[in-house]
Image: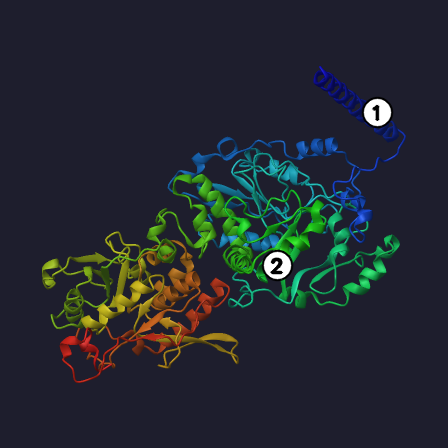
């Protein structure tokens, strides 16, 4: 009985407590409404511990202030709805795939600029990148995608780069079609004081390639977030990342750094106003200045003088070079120039920009390169980065370098990445997977038209734990008519066919005379295929690197018709190539150098210990490079090779080194034979022509200009077989014919 009374009493207490909680909460809400109507601002309930117990920590009001924007969330949503009228656009609802299914395939057209039209330096770089890409077309009837000739990068009405009346002008385009199949590039949107995402015109169903995209407005699988880059960002190439080697220990002098502006008026990064709380001047350097703009002194607060004084104590570049983590807080907009600066410097970005859709988020796995923080939890950042282990620090830094060099080091790469992402959406059945985008050499150098299977690419063998095939295809480039059975090509056929690793031999006929009948060639123990390399009757040197369907093996042995080799030399080089399948492995070395007098790149054929080129007149490489040579490089470079009948070997070395960031590999070669006498009716050697060497010098400079940097890498590495020069039986030696190397 007493137990029952206890339970009843306990139930009554619970009911009373609930009534008090309910009515108390209701009264508090009513009080809040009353005070709000009277113009008073209710103090937000603290989400952390009482700051009085944590002296020196940030004020909640300071962190949660909306930055001066008077718009309510409802007003902002209505504003966004006006900007993004087609907010539900997806590729299958707002894109015309039929335009991309014809013979032209994925082509991009740029509207011609109107007379007197001026574009900014950055937009000019974007347009140039499109024009110089393999996707550009000058015929709008062939186009799958359209790019505006009007500069839409800066939509800040206070900017000198702002272009008015964009809405009227684009509606006048006969192919506009409410923006379908159009891509609009934008770096800055909105204006002072609120800097909304309003572009000032209706984008319709166009794809937005925009910096500082908000996740609330981002149309997944349709829009593309691009990085904010400055007008000084290079058109091509770009500087390499700063992580030269795996430094041990991987941590740098400073653990965490930031140095930048804070804003006194208008919307800005409220987090920046609180960054001084984590600054200790030792391993964490967090500096802001309000000394910017014309009238900053009119709005200066009590902290300005002290912050400015502390700001001048540290050099930004010195901090960037010597910090493990770099804070990347939002500025006026969500994005920041410091994002790309941190990636290049291998300073792990710590993002404090809630709602920012990271650049190329569709394909890049950013959790492997950055740390995403929360602006509301600024004070937890120091302890968070201190808890990151050394192994993860090194992994994060390495990934920043991979992403920087693959997608962000130049405007060219940013634009091409944008186009390739759209192309993957259009042709989803042959699109790249996430691994291809996030592993070296990056998605731009992986052409899915070749294959969507990782095991078909040479640079993935190590990751997959597989080895290349055990056979090769020899491709012999023939330019001389067949007039005698004693020509060097006949002996070369016999030597190559004796290799137990040779699967087939392809003779690429590039002579002015038609190829001889198969009966004119000697019988072979392996299949012999004669392919005409001429196009429309003209000789084209670049055809030796066409992706010939007859090549069935992964390994290709490229040979000139007059190459002199032994079978054992070929076998040894093939064994070496199987250990380095992503590189060129061969015999004759050459080198490049910088001429400080001419201020240009030079080419030398002197035999020294150092080399950067292995001639493809006798070299192994993976057949994928045929596909890359023919479909990645611009037609202008291949036209140069065909016009001069020269430099195709140098261009192939440029291409492979740009993919691998590694030099080719030279293998053992016997001492040079005496020059073979020229047979009657055959061509003289090209190097006899005095213009031959001059052309190669010019080619090196031209190729470096297109790549935007010098991809060739010097090396002194050479691989020779172990010959055991002793008096034991010759039968014990695997490469006995190389005794006299």
Q: CA distance from mark 2 to mark 1?
A: 50 Å
**Label 1 Cα crowd, 10 Å radius (few <14 / some 14-19 / many 20+):** few
**Secondary-structure class at tag 1:** helix
Question: In the visual, does 674 lie left or right of 588?
Answer: left
Whether residue 451 is situated above or below residue 240 in the rendered picture: above
Which residue is labeled 1 in the image?
27
Residue 211, x across and y down, in percent: 62, 47
Residue 238: which quarter of the image? Answer: bottom right
Question: In the visual, does 450 lie left or right of 421?
Answer: left
Sequence-first tag of 2 and 1: 1
Question: In the visual, does 145 lie left or right of 308?
Answer: left
Residue 185, x across and y down, in percent: 59, 46
Whether residue 192 is situated above or below residue 457 in the rendered picture: above
Answer whether labels 2 and 1 touch (C-beta < 8 Å): no
Comparing marks 2 and 1, which lies closer to the viewer? Answer: 1
Which residue is labeled 2 in the image?
342
Q: Can residue 554 be seen?
A: yes
Question: Which label belongs to residue 186?
Answer: none
Residue 2: which quarter of the image? Answer: top right
Q: Residue at x 86, y 30 (%)?
A: 36
Residue 386, x across and y down, in percent: 63, 57
**Label 2 Cα crowd, 10 Å radius (few <14 / some 14-19 / many 20+):** many
């Amino acid at each position: 009985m007493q137990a029952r009374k206890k339970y009843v009493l306990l139930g009554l207490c619970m009911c009373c407590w609930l009534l008090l909680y309910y009515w108390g909460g209701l009264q508090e809400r009513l009080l809040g409404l009353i005070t709000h109507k009277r113009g008073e601002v209710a103090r937000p309930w603290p989400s952390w511990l009482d700051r009085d117990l944590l002296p020196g920590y940030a004020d909640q009001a300071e962190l949660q202030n909306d930055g001066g924007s008077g718009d309510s969330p409802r007003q902002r949503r209505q504003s966004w709805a006006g900007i993004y009228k087609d907010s539900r656009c997806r590729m299958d609802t707002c894109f015309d795939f039929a335009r991309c299914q014809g013979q032209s395939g994925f082509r991009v057209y740029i509207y011609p600029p109107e007379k007197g039209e001026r574009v900014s330096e950055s937009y000019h770089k974007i347009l140039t990148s499109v024009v110089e890409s393999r996707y550009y077309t000058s015929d709008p009837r062939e186009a799958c995608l359209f790019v505006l000739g009007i500069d839409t990068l800066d939509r800040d009405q206070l900017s000198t780069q702002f272009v008015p009346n964009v809405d009227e002008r684009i509606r006048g385009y006969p192919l506009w079609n409410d923006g379908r199949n159009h891509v609009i590039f934008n770096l800055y949107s909105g204006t002072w004081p609120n800097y909304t995402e309003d572009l000032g015109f209706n984008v319709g169903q166009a794809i937005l390639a925009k910096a500082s995209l908000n996740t609330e407005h981002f149309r997944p699988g349709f829009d593309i977030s691009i990085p904010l880059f400055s007008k000084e960002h290079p058109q091509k190439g770009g500087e390499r990342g700063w992580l030269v080697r795996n430094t041990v220990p991987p941590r740098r002098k400073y653990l965490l750094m930031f140095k930048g502006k804070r804003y006194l008026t208008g919307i800005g990064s409220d987090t920046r106003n609180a960054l001084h709380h984590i600054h200790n001047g030792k391993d964490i350097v967090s500096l802001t200045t309000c000394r910017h703009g014309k009238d900053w002194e009119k709005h200066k607060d009590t902290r300005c003088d002290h912050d400015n004084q502390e700001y001048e104590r540290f050099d930004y570049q010195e901090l960037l070079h010597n910090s493990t983590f770099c804070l990347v807080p939002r500025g006026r907009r969500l994005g920041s120039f410091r994002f790309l600066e941190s990636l290049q410097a291998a300073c792990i970005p710590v993002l404090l920009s809630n709602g920012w859709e990271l650049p190329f988020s569709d394909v890049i796995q950013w959790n492997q390169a950055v740390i995403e923080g929360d602006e509301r939890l600024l004070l937890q950042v120091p302890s968070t980065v201190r808890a990151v282990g050394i192994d993860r620090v090194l992994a994060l830094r390495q990934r920043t370098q991979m992403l920087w060099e693959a997608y962000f080091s130049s405007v060219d790469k940013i634009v091409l990445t944008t186009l390739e992402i759209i192309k993957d959406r259009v042709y989803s059945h042959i699109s790249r997977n996430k691994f291809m985008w996030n592993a070296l050499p990056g998605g731009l150098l992986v052409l899915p038209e070749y294959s969507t299977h990782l095991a078909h690419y040479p640079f993935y063998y190590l990751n997959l734990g597989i080895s290349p095939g055990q056979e090769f295809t020899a491709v012999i480039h023939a330019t001389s008519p067949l007039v005698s059975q004693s020509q060097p090509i006949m002996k070369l056929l016999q030597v190559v066919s004796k290799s137990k690793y040779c699967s087939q031999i392809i003779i690429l006929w590039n002579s002015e005379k038609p190829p001889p009948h198969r009966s004119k060639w000697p019988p072979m123990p392996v299949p012999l295929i004669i392919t005409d390399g001429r196009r429309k009757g003209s000789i084209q040197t670049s055809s030796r690197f066409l992706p010939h369907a007859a090549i069935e093996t992964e390994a290709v042995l490229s040979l000139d018709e007059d190459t002199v080799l032994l079978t054992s030399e070929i076998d040894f080089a093939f064994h070496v190539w199987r250990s380095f399948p992503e590189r060129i492995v061969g015999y004759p070395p050459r080198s490049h150098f910088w001429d400080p007098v001419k201020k240009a790149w030079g080419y030398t054929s002197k035999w020294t210990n150092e080399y950067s080129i292995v001639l493809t007149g006798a070299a192994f490489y993976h057949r994928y490079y045929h596909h890359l040579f023919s479909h990645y490089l611009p037609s202008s470079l291949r036209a140069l090779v065909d016009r001069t009948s020269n430099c195709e070997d140098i261009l192939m070395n440029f291409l492979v080194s740009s993919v691998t960031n590694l030099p080719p590999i030279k293998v053992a070669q016997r001492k040079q034979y005496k020059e073979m006498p020229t047979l009657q009716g055959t061509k003289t050697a090209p190097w006899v022509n005095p213009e031959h060497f001059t052309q190669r010098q010019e080619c090196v400079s031209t190729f470096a200009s297109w790549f935007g940097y010098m991809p060739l890498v010097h090396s002194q590495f050479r691989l020779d077989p172990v010959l055991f020069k002793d008096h034991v039986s010759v039968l014990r030696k695997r490469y006995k014919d190389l005794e006299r190397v």
